[in-house]
Amino acid sequence: MIAFVSGPVAALTPSSAVIQVGGVGMLVHCSPGTLARLHLGEEARLATSLVVREDSLTLYGFADDDERQTFELLQTASGVGPKVAQAMLAVHSPEGLRVAVARGDAKALTAVPGIGPKGAQKLLLELKDRLGAPTGAVPSQHAAAGAAAVVAAPAPWHEQLHAALVGLGFAPREAEEAVAAVTPEAEAMEKPNVSALLRTALQSRNRTR
């Protein structure tokens, strides 16, 4: 297992990064929130999980070990593969998922593209004893705003957010509408944070169902 990769960021796309490790470029698939922390040419360290299939080896990257462990635990639930697990972490932090499962909050899970009400109920039952109890690490709204100023997304934020939404299953026009809806929040930030904006866009979409 490749536990982590460390090195300069050689390339960035809306869904992945290339980390130069010992002269080799490692392609790592990441959530928008993780990618927002990376900058071309700068050193980065990503916790990683290698998904092995008969015809492929895919490396997924995370901001920390908690995200990686949650990613792997989510896949122990039936019907949850790497892409769905990564989408869940794009919408909710690991602690947010622990809180949602502990509270039996199916609506929080349906905010994830591809998870409907029945699927959410099933996941709550399967994950109840797997993710562990909440640790109390969910940041307050004020703390989250402060974090947004520290963890800044590369400009232009709207293009990154639009690409992330399309990657999560939005039609281009729906993605444009979602970007427009969170623009006031982005403009209120000193440095717009793609991860926070993505979660707002997805949660708003869930409320309008």
Image (cartoon, grey):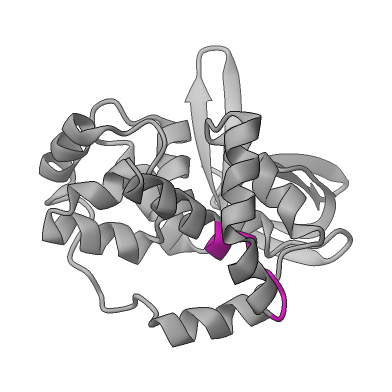
Q: Residue at x 69, y 41 (%)?
A: 163
Q: Residue at x 72, y 75 (%)?
A: 191
Q: Vertically, is 10 above or below 76?
A: below
Is residue 158 toward the left or the right of residue 11 in the image?
Answer: left
Is residue 6 toward the left or the right of residue 99 in the image?
Answer: right
Residue 104 or 200: which is nearer the viewer? 200
Residue 52 seen by the camera: yes
Q: Give the image location of residue 80, x and y in percent.
A: 33, 31
The magenta stretch is 190-197
Q: Residue at x 53, y 30 (%)?
A: 169
Q: Give the image location of residue 65, x and y in percent.
A: 46, 61
Q: Vertically, is 205 above or below 43?
A: above
Q: Give the image location of residue 64, x and y in percent.
A: 51, 64
Assess whether residue 194 is covered by the magenta stretch.
yes
Q: Residue at x 17, y 30 (%)?
A: 118
Residue 29 seen by the camera: no
Is residue 57 toward the left or the right of residue 14 in the image?
Answer: left
Q: Assign the C terminus to one quadrant of the image.
A: top left
